[in-house]
Structures are given as C-alpha cells and as structure tokens.
Amino acid sequence: RDILTFPLLQDSMISLMDIDSERLSFIHKTVQKLIDAGNYPAKVQATMDRVQALQDADVVVTTILSGSTEVWKHDIEIPKKYGVDINVGDTRGPAGIFRFLRTLPDMMDIVRDMEKYCPNAVLLNYTNPMAMLCSAIQRQTFIPVTGLCHSVQGTAEMLAGWIGAPINEITYTCAGINHMAWYLDYKWNGKDAYPLIHNAITNNPSVYQEEMVRNEMYLALGYYITESSGHNSEYNWWFRKRPDLIEKYCTHSTGWNPGEYAYILREYQKTENTWKEGVRVELAKEVTNNDLERGNEYAAYIINALAGGEPYRFNGNVQNTGLITNLPEGACVEIPVWVDKSGFQPVHIGSLPPQLALLAKLSAGIE
C-alpha cells in the first residue's frame, strides 16, 4: 500500500516470493486488490522460484522465519530446563544464537542469488536477530544491506503520547545497537522534552507501569531505550534471574510485549491457527480510500528515495565505520541514516554516553 502511494513507484513490478503456496496466494490476491482499487499501473507477480523473483530487482525486502515454530520452541524450552526463562528469544542468548545459526544460511542463499541476478539491488532486512544477521551479511557481500526495526519509531510515538505531543512535532537523535539504541536527544518543537518524559514516568503510575523495565533503565541511566520491556528484560538478566523479579518487573507491565515466559512463541503459534480466516475476512471487504492512504513503513520511503524521490532519514542497521567511536569498529550499529538516489549515508554519532556503551557491549557480548 505505502509503496504505491509514491508517484515514482506507481508503475512498479512487485514480485512476491514464498515457500508456502497458500500464504503466497493470499498475499498475491491482497496486493492485486489494492492495485485494482487504486487504479495503479503497477503489476504484481507471485512465484515460489526465488531466481524469478529476484531477476533484475531494484530493492529486495526480506522477512522470513527459518524453520517452523515447532523448531523454534526448542530454543525456548531447552534453556528453561536450566533456569533461563525466555520471553522472546529472537535477538541474543541461547535462543537468539540458534535462531541466527538457522537463519544465516537461508539469508546468504538469498544474497548470493542477488549477486547473480540483481547485483545493483539494495537489501532491506526485517528479519531477526537483526544485528547478528546484518553484521554477518555486510561482511560477506558487496550488496548494500541495512536492517529495519520498528522499535525506534514506535517508541518515539509512545513517548510523544506520554507527554501529549503530536509526533510530527517531535525530533530526536537515536543511536546504539538494534533493540538497545538510545534517544540521545528527544525534542518537542526544538525544546528538550526529557523533563516532560521524566515527569510522566515519575508522577503518572499508569505510565510507569506500562513499561516498568524500560522505565527503571531510564531512571538508572538517564536515557530512554528503544525496545520493549519484554525484550529488555532478556538483555538485562537481573530482571529475570529469579521468579520473584519476573513477577515484579516483567509479567504485568511491559506494554505490547508482555514479559511472561515464551510469550512471543505462543503468539506466533496462536496466529498460525487463526491467520487464514482473518485474511479471508479482509479479502471480502471493500477497499476504501482510507485503506489506500500512506502509512509510516520505513521500506516504502527508502525505496522512493532510492528511485530519486525525496531524501529520507531513518534509523538503520549498518556497519560501524567510526560512526560510534566507543563501540567496536565493524560491529553492526543502529543509527540515523540518510538515503537518496546515491544510496545510504550513515550519520556520524561520536561517543555514546559511557554507561550506554558499556551496557551495549555487555548485552551484545562484545569485548
């Protein structure tokens, strides 16, 4: 939908590829429905042949799960036997590492095909574990690669809501590593909004309860972090090291991502049992003008900028080439990036506050 709202992209060929023919058929019908409703000159094709999908592509978007949830559940259940209580398990720790080891070969197969069949294309990756995958891919290919995560824009909107600010009046500089990036500044109409955020956290019990883990981190460290309390309870294991701490900090107060054991795995498995009927209902609906209005998805704005449209600033996952000076050279960092027709231009950040750099290194296992 978002791609087709840009005039430069309205005659695009959208090529969909999946290894599941039923899912592929559903999304093909959905995209065709949007094209027809908007009377766009775009075309859509669906294929289970990756080479056909990639042939002469300009931009490739990846969002995959390697192995079923029946495989993934072992990443969660085996550590539990040894006292490691996991909430999400897609980023770090034993679950994240094994998910990375399963996913990287599939991602590299995609990248190797890109090198052959669309060597001038750009790869936009939405697949976790983001930092590990992007770091490994960026070291092994000439294809420009960046990783996209919703936590930066999502948290910026959450904070704006807490202080009563329209999001279009908010600006910020956010940097760190994926799921552990920090709002180094956060401004409302050019004025520091951190005092308002602090007031909301310390004087509004519902705000404090909504993101208890993140709010405790902010109160200790002085900067707000991008990813949810459920995730961050895993990255900062003192929140999960005993059942009483999990009960106190993680189970009842973590926003969209509740911190109880294996929450995301259960959500995925629930969705696997319900998605077909939901899609059928959506396909039966008439498309309204509201359904065709542009949303805020990163990829569409990036693709438009690469095609020669308006330059766009986003937070992306890129290789650290002196961009954050107190994180290791060559590590994957999540920082502001400008994109235009010439490609990606990451923004130099300099040093993170020392407490933030130390926590990023500890959480990422960086020496």
Image: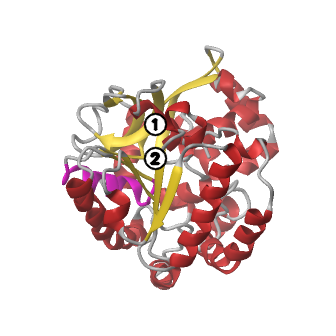
Does the magenta segment cover residue 132? yes
Q: Is residue 301 above or below residue 180?
A: above
Badge 1 amino acid? Ile
Give, as a single range, the part of the protein colored magenta: 126-141
Tell me, yes or no, if residue 128 can be seen here: yes
Q: CA distance from mark 1 to mark 2?
A: 10 Å
Residue found farthest to the top: 190
Q: In the rendered image, which residue does mark 2 sit on? A: 148
Q: Residues within 10 Å of mark 2 (few under 14, many from 20)?
A: many
Q: Nearer the viewer, mark 1 or mark 2?
A: 1
Q: In the rendered image, which residue does mark 1 sit on? A: 302
- Classify residue 96 as left or right of residue 221: left
Nearer to the camera, 323 or 291? 291
Image spot of residue 311 (x, y percent): 45, 24
Nearer to the camera, 329 or 135? 135
Nearer to the camera, 211 or 75? 75
Badge 2 amino acid? Leu
The answer to which quarter of the image holds residue 290 is: top right
Q: Are marks 1 and 2 in contact (CB under 8 Å)?
A: yes
Label 2, secondary structure: give it: loop
Image spot of residue 84 (x, y percent): 48, 75
